[in-house]
Image: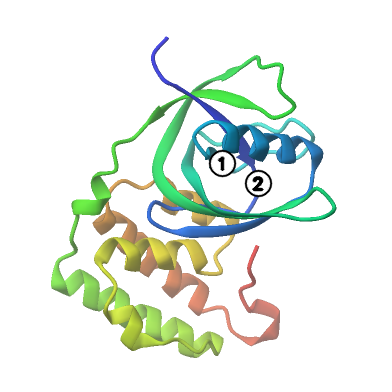
């Protein structure tokens, strides 16, 4: 069977996109074991969202491989880590592993997004919609810094930090190509931006 073996960390609402960073606090025994194993090998783990609740939830098909670029071992045995998103992966099958953490066999994507660029009109539309959304939500954003980001960092950065629900974020991860992801982000910004008042205020999942 083709595919790469990936040790996974199923975590609802915590999505990692290629080129982005994700800080995590690791406290459960099985995930401490996962981090120790990854550090002993290639420092890589797979972030993926569970579809269901429970101790062994069903998983979505697509996640993102992350490399541990920073790690702090705490006195209580926990870890603080920072993951850097490398590339998306698609689960082929789960491996019946003897480890405390779950493992899958997966097809890892070559990261084509690094070379992708948006048309200037696409970039402008995303910036305009992002500004409108930020103002509605009362966010303070350094737009000069944002303007200097390359297209992949800009698109995936919004996809990762925007306060959409977990299903919307999963849809953003699964969509192919920066241009299509930018288009979906605009639709989501418009949709969530219309929810006003305290009752409808979007919250981080």
Q: Is residue 195 above or below residue 51?
A: below
Element type where label 1 sits in the image: strand
State whether residue 51 appears in this view: no
Q: Which mark is residue 150?
A: none
Q: Disc 1 marks which residue?
A: 48
Q: Position of residue 27 (x, y in %)?
A: 78, 49
- Residue 9 horizontal/vertical position (percent): 63, 39
Query: Is 105 situated left or right of 24 in this image?
Result: left
Instruction: Give the alpha-carbon distance from disc 2 to disc 1, as whole Å.
Output: 6 Å
Q: Nearer the viewer, residue 83 or 129?
A: 83
Asked whether residue 41 appears in the rendered view, the answer is yes
Q: Residue 32's x, y, as percent?
A: 73, 41
Is the residue under label 1 in contact with that under label 2 (CB below 8 Å)? yes
- Neighbours of disc 2 within 10 Å: few (<14), some (14-19), many (20+): few
Query: Which of the numbered marks, if any, corresponds to residue 11?
Result: 2
Label 2: which secondary element:
loop
Which quarter of the rendering shows the C terminus? bottom right
Say which residue appears at 56% left-offset and 69% top-offset.
163
Q: Can you say whether 104 is above or below 121 in the image?
A: above
**Residue located 39% across and 51% down the image:** 18
First of labels 2, 1 by sequence position: 2
- Residue appearing at x 77%, y 50% in the figure: 78
Q: How busy is the neighbourhood of tag 1: few (under 14 within 10 Å), some, or many (20 plus)? A: many
């Amino acid at each position: 069977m083709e595919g790469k073996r990936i040790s996974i960390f199923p975590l609802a609402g915590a999505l990692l996109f290629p080129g982005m960073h994700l800080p995590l606090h690791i406290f459960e025994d099985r995930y401490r074991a996962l981090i120790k194993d990854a550090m002993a090998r290639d420092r890589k783990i797979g972030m993926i969202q569970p579809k269901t609740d429970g101790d062994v939830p069903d998983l979505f098909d697509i996640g993102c491989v992350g490399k541990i670029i920073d790690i702090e071992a705490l006195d209580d045995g926990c870890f603080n880590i920072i993951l850097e998103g490398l590339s998306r992966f698609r689960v082929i099958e789960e491996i019946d592993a003897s480890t405390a953490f779950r493992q899958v066999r997966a097809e890892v994507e070559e990261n084509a997004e690094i070379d992708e660029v948006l048309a200037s009109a696409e970039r402008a539309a995303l910036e305009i919609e992002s500004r409108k959304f930020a103002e509605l939500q009362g966010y303070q954003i350094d737009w000069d810094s944002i303007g200097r980001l390359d297209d992949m960092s800009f698109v995936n950065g919004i996809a990762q930090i925007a306060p959409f629900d977990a299903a919307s974020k999963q849809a953003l991860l699964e969509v192919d190509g920066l241009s299509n992801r930018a288009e979906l982000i605009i639709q989501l910004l418009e949709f969530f931006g219309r929810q006003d008042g305290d009752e409808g205020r979007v919250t981080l999942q």
